[in-house]
Image (spheres, rainbow, N blue to C red):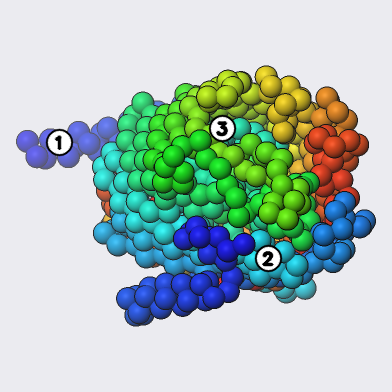
Amino acid sequence: MISINPLSLHLFGNLARQAVLCVGCVLFSHALFAAWEGQVGGEGRFYFEDPLDAKQHTNENLSFYVQPEYRHRWNGGKSSFTFVGFGRLDQNDEERSHVDIRELSWDTSYDNWDVRIGLRKVFWGVTEFQHLVDIINQTDLVDNIDTEDKLGQPMINVAAVQDWGTVDFFVMPYFRERNYAGVKGRLRNQPFVSDSEVRYESDDEEKHVDYALRYSHYFGDWDVGLSYFKGTDRSPDLIDDVDANNQPISVAYYELIDQIGVDLQVTKEHVLWKLEGIYRDSAVESYTAAGGGFEYTLPDNGSSTMDVSLLSEYHADSRGENSRTFDQDIGFGVRFGLHDAKSTAILMGFVYDLNNNGYIFSIESSQRIADNWTLVFDARFFEGQRVGDSGYDVSQDDHIEITLSHYF
Amino acid sequence: MKKISCEFLLLSALFVFPVMSTYAESPEEKGLRLTVAENTFNKGWQDFKANLTLTLRNKQGEENIFTMRMLTKEVEADGDKSIIVFDSPGDIRGTALLSHTHTLSADDQWLYLSSIKRIKRISSNNKSGPFLGSEFAYEDLTSPETEKYTYRWLREEVVDGRTLDVIEQFPSYKYSGYTRLVKWLDQDYKQPVKVEFYDRKDRHLKTLASTEFVEYLDKYWYPSMMFMTNHQTGKNTQLEWQNYQFKNGFTDNDFNRNALKRLR
């Protein structure tokens, strides 16, 4: 039950000690120039139906999080130290109660070189409904199932910044396991993914050293990225098994892969055209996956201050239904940006699985309700008829979520 | 010799100037000439950085305050390159906007969302939209390139002892939110001290008043305070410029996508 992964120690004993130690060190060394900032927040989730598995918690859940941040710059802004911590306390799911170091990084930039060492977060890609090319960081799936939250990745990153583009080279000496909701958690796999048993293809397990290379640049209105990754796959295969008490569990199995990725965006007057594609090769299988579409912003009529954008993307995977997600899916979205003093924004999204009729419908809205306070309202609805259909595992987990955050 | 040249100059003045006035520069030519002179005069500062405070006020007197930093670099024979980094309020802290403005083609813009480390190329066409919900539109804040408008000189006015040229300008940009602007160009500052904006139905929409001019680098006069009033909504926005620093030695590498990641 207790993860031994030193980077994601579970609440509370180790967390408290580590946090106090870490915060104490940084505070002490920079007491005079302290520049702490960050955010704290509370989240309430309300589910409409009883869970699929009786072991999962009932229909209300409360959760609190804190994200302390510390930044220090010197050398005329050419060197920087960054610390971003994260901790969450969840009412029901002990796996969702967790801490992480999102960033702990020392960065220096020279004339045509940037060197960045430490735990960092890197994003690659252009599409909205799925991030195929993005592979450096492990997803923090317990925080949010939208896969936008990431665990800090230990790395050495050297970027060569030239007139003809930027080449990034990454060496990643330590792998982070994906964290999954616990047995009592909602929005989880069926059966739940065990965190006491994890399997790796590599005998080095999480100590396998991964490498990545990326070229990115823009040519007129074309933004182009080419990437190569060699190492432990961030998204595991989930294998059905039983635990010591003969209860069904899913076990994460991490393969070694080679992945080539391409991402492309063409920015025209009112339309952004987007494409991402990968080719992935492992000992078990090789496959390609791609997704693309557009984001169209309605021409301004001169009287309204609101932006309305329409999004649509199609995603496909050569493995067909053997792919866990986005085997042949189409997504639609509408985004309203009110451009008011409160930065009100609303995004509605619908993803439909053409192979098995599962779908996800979501509404997200956010607003600054006072200086340094924001309120986010999310609603998500899932549909999946049969075991194995996308959406089935969470088909009883339709919910609304309200998050109040304070920035300091 | 010296006497002769003086006489020659005097003669030239007597003969040439009347010829010029007979040639009669049209109001359009004069508006263009003065704007070209304004923009030419205001080049050569190389680069600057400054802190900005944007204060939004609605009819009820409620305030919303945004703080940000701006870095700008001049580009030879093209529009400037600039980055705006937001410092507060907290939810947009670290968000940055990179712009490569162009005199003839559409600007290139990238938005950096620091919380998810994502750089997104955005279309620069919706320039008429409000900047952070303020009374400033994006197009009000881009660098004043001569080619973006056509001009017409209206008259000369003297206000508080300062001589101003009143020039009407018409956006060439088809998605502009305005039919025309009227600017009061200070002959000494070579900067507009007031601008009136007329919406697509040619109704008076907004007025910008710039005050507290300070001279930098012994040449350039920049306002420390800009005040935009929306006459149709009753809202106003104050934009305060502080800590101007020139000639920081910025290079193109300080204004590319990679640079967005190290500004927080």
Within 10 Å of disc 3 (Cα), the crowding (few <14, some 14-19, many 20+) is many
**How far apart are labels 3 and 2 at the CA level?**
31 Å
Q: Position of residue A366 (x, y in %)?
A: 74, 57
Q: Please state which of residues B64 and A371 is positioned toward the viewer in this rendering.
A: A371
- Which image quarter is the C terminus of chain A in? bottom right
Q: Position of residue A374 (x, y in %)?
A: 70, 65
**Which is nearer the N-term, disc 3 or disc 2?**
2
Q: Is residue A137 left or right of residue A370?
A: left
Q: Which residue is mark 3?
A: A133
The reply to whether discs 3 and 2 touch (Cβ–Cβ < 8 Å) is no
**How far apart are labels 1 and 3 at the CA level?**
75 Å
Within 10 Å of disc 1 (Cα), the crowding (few <14, some 14-19, many 20+) is few
User: Who's the residue at 34% across and 56% down the image?
Assistant: A106
Is residue A96 visible in the rendered image? The answer is yes
Q: Which mark is residue B5?
A: 1
In which quarter of the view is residue A344 placed? Answer: bottom right
What chain does mark 2 sit on? Answer: A
Q: Is residue A305 left or right of residue A67?
A: right
User: Who's the residue at 59% across and 22% down the image?
Assistant: A285
Q: Is residue A308 above or below residue A66?
A: above
- Closest to the camera, between mark 1 and mark 3, is 3
Amino acid type assigned to the residue bearing label 3 in the image: Val
Amino acid type assigned to the residue bearing label 1 in the image: Ser
In which quarter of the view is residue B221 placed? Answer: bottom left
